[in-house]
Image (cartoon, rainbow, N blue to C red):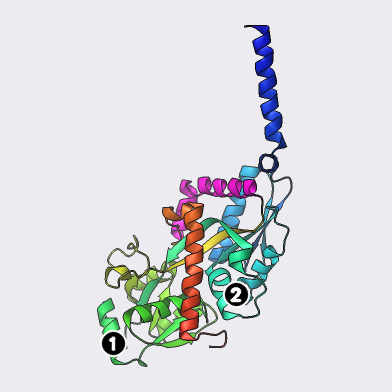
Amino acid sequence: MNTTIGRRQLLQSTGASLAALALPGWAQSATYPTRAVKVVVGSAPGGPTDFMARLVADHFARAFGQGFVVDNKPGASGMPAADNVVKSTPGGYTLLVSGATAISVAPHLFPKITYDPMKSLQPLGMLGAGAYVLVVHPSVKARSLAELVQIAKAKPEGLAFGSGGIGSGSHLCTELFCRATGTKMVHVPYKGDAQAFADLMSGQVQVQFAAPNVVVGAAKDGRVRALGITSSDRLTALPDVPAIKESVADFEYLGWVGLFAPVGTPAAIVDVLTAQWARDRQEASVRGKLEGLGMNAPDRLADRNALDAFVRQDYVRMGALIRDLGITSNS
């Protein structure tokens, strides 16, 4: 090999490496993280949102060789958790795991909210997204979606639906259903979907949109009757229950949980975290755990641009619904 050419190639290679090291984004992504990362979640330990926060934290810790520590800040519709992350230094060391309530709903319900999620937070990944199942108490004579709509139209005040509280996913999903079908039912809010479901099974309320993992057993043994699924596709666990979209055009509602970072987090770090979750979510063990919760997010939301568009559309749709129906935190 010509010595002069070899020396020139070495200098060019060394120069390129030094130039790469001089790029702030490259250096940040190459060294991140150098210390523990806090993963803030707006729910108490033990629930599905906390489960997904710990799932992603565990996988990130193994991938990056640093601790990803879950910090539970439950209460107030997840707003304290989101506020904590928004006010943190945007360096990739404080992340948020949140459901739709703190992102798409709370800003429209609480005028004194201290953050704007569309301006202060950026989505990194959809951790899970799942359908609700429309169920009725066996005393309701409807055995199909069409029959339920007929009953609701005939007696607008005759059916009561339970929800996990004002502004909860089960509440707003029902309101969207009523709007799409031209029906009306009486809202009975509870402190959580589990309490609502208990009263549904006892007949205190007649209708509820509930999570699949809660519904399947009760539906199969006849304690409740499942009439529809809010996702575009049917559920494997309830193959005979139609998607509502099959008879109500364009109806879809997904309860979701996402991973967010403060706006201003370096793009290189955002890219690293997004790419890592994209890899993790393909693992069979991860998909199995999410499917067990009925929360395996659609593949279309793996793309960050599609995810950002989905979150913004959900924010706009929930805001319009809340304003049009005059829903307030005291409704």
Task: Give the class, few, some or many, for how many residues have Cα within 10 Å of label 1's Cα (few <14, many ≥20).
Answer: some
First in sequence, mark 1 or 2: give its number: 2
Q: Residue at x 48, y 46 (%)?
A: 283
Which of 1 and 54 lies nearest the eye of the viewer? 1
Measured along the vertical axis of the image, is residue 235 above or below residue 144?
A: above
| Picture disc at residue 238 | none
| Region of the chain picked out in magenta, as a range | 266-293
Which of 127 and 120 lies nearest the eye of the viewer? 120
Q: Position of residue 186 (x, y in %)?
A: 42, 89
Q: Position of residue 78 (x, y in %)?
A: 61, 71
Left or right: 331, with 268 as reference point = left
Residue 74 lies in what quarter of the image?
bottom right
Q: Is residue 267 magenta?
A: yes
Which amino acid is tagged 1?
Ile
Q: Mark 1 to mark 2: distance in Å?
A: 33 Å
Q: Main secondary structure of the magenta part?
A: helix
Q: Say what secondary structure mark 2 lies in.
A: helix
Which amino acid is tagged 2?
Ser
Task: Give the class, few, some or many, for how many residues have Cα within 10 Å of label 2's Cα (few <14, many ≥20).
Answer: many
Q: Residue at x 46, y 72 (%)?
A: 317
Residue 20 lies in what quarter of the image?
top right
Which of 186 and 319 lies nearest the eye of the viewer? 319
Residue 10 visible to an observer of this rendering:
yes
Give the residue pinned by disc 1: 151
Q: Which quadrant is the N terminus positioned in?
A: top right
Q: Residue furthest top?
A: 2
Q: Is residue 169 magenta?
A: no
Measured along the vertical axis of the image, is residue 10 above or below residue 133?
A: above
Residue 43 visible to an observer of this rendering:
no
Q: Residue at x 62, y 44 (%)?
A: 62
Give the residue pinned by disc 2: 77
